[in-house]
Image (cartoon, helix red, strand yellow):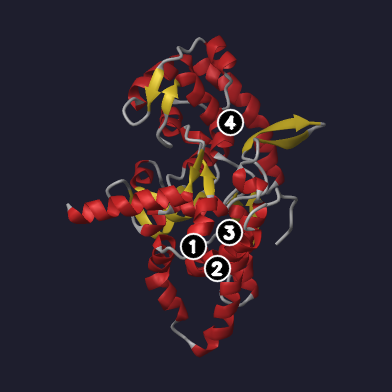
Amino acid sequence: MPRFATTHLKEGHSLLIDQARKLGYTAFGPLILRFSTWLAAEAQREGVHKLYFLSREGYFLKSHFEKSLALGLVNAPGIESRYLLISRRAAFGAVNKTRSSLKAILEAGEFDGRLYNLLEARIGYSPEVSEKIGLPNVEVSLLDDVEKTLDILIHHLEPLNELALKEQKPMLEYLGAEGFTGGSPLGLVDLGYAGSIQRSLQSMTGNRLAGFYFATTKTVNEWQDESNRLFACFAKDCSLAKMPPVYRYALALESWMTSPQGQLTLFEMDAGKPVPKFGPVGKMQANFEISEAVAEGVERYMEDIAYLAPFDPTWEETLVSRSESIMTVALESAAFSTILNFLCVEDDFCGKGEIPIAELVATLMNDMRLSNVV
């Protein structure tokens, strides 16, 4: 793994690094390797020869997939893997605004606050821009007000699309430079879950896309079609009523599966070339060596499986049946409390700032106990 300048971890540095590696090995190694084997088989079945690993989760996913190939655990002849700079913010800002695309932006996660703050988080419009467009700065709660908010935005399509066009042109330049064109389906790889980036990219480019995800929600059934297909390794049709482990602990995965950069906000043209612009780094980017240590644990697990695989022909079947439960037991045990207390995930997109993973796991465990009692 490449090394990057990070903030010094003053207290318990060696303990954090050691626990991060063990967490990667124990909780996530089986899950990531299972996904890699599934991804290779599924991409070949769908005739996909180019896989784009979406930033920022794709930073380590790409590395792990290539590691599994190098170790001979995965066979994917002729498949090219690339890292694609993208984010929901960048995709939503650039996509043409219609009732359908605006609804997808509003349904991409909960948000409680003012409309101006929502638009700044989702599509990058400053409050001054929203005011200039003539939008009212009303209170919104996206669990209840999607249609109400949509009715407000739909009356401002012309200025919204003028702003979208400014971001769309440099993004399309970047996608073209990355070879994001062609008649064969292009593969997108990410954790999931609603496929909102895939939906926006297909709308902007018209390319045939196949998305390969850890899990997908039931909302994707409303819009996927033959030119825009989604596949899930562990679970599909997820929702608040259906939360398998990989969906329930999605933020725990996202916490370390990041890149050293802040979130991509948009592309701008500079000297005739598209240049990416990034938001500020969060806690996990500032202390990126922790994420690297988790990733090193995952790769060490792969190396051990590669050594043992010749003596155990059922190793892949074991991953299929047990990788999610192994992750669950590890996250819910007290063994990794130190590192879980350090991990967090940025969620400005939903207006929640940095979410501590230890608190999240504790809340989810309590919710599961209560549901079992009921």
Q: Amino acid at mark 2?
A: Lys
From the image, state whether disc 1 or disc 4 is nearer to you: 1
Local crowd size for mark 3, using a 10 Å CA cut-off: few (<14), some (14–19), many (≥20): many
Query: Is there a contact, CB below 8 Å, between mark 1 and mark 2?
Result: yes
**Residue drawn 54% across the image and 79% down it:** 305
Left or right of residue 119, residue 85 in this image: right
Identify the mark nearer the N-term, 3 or 4. 3
Q: Amino acid at mark 1?
A: Phe
**Residue drawn 54% across the image and 25% down it:** 120
Q: Quadrant of residue 320?
A: bottom left
- Between the C-alphas of marks 4 and 2, the distance is 40 Å
- Between the C-alphas of marks 3 and 1, the distance is 22 Å
| Secondary structure beneath label 1 | loop
Percent x, y of residue 117: 50, 23
Instruction: Residue under label 1, please give it.
Output: 336
Identify the mark nearer the N-term, 1 or 4. 4
On residue 368, which mark appears? none
Instruction: Residue under label 4, please give it.
Output: 94
Q: Is residue 105 above or below residue 190?
A: above
Left or right of residue 349, residue 246 in this image: left
Instruction: Residue under label 3, please give it.
Output: 61
| Secondary structure beneath label 4 | helix
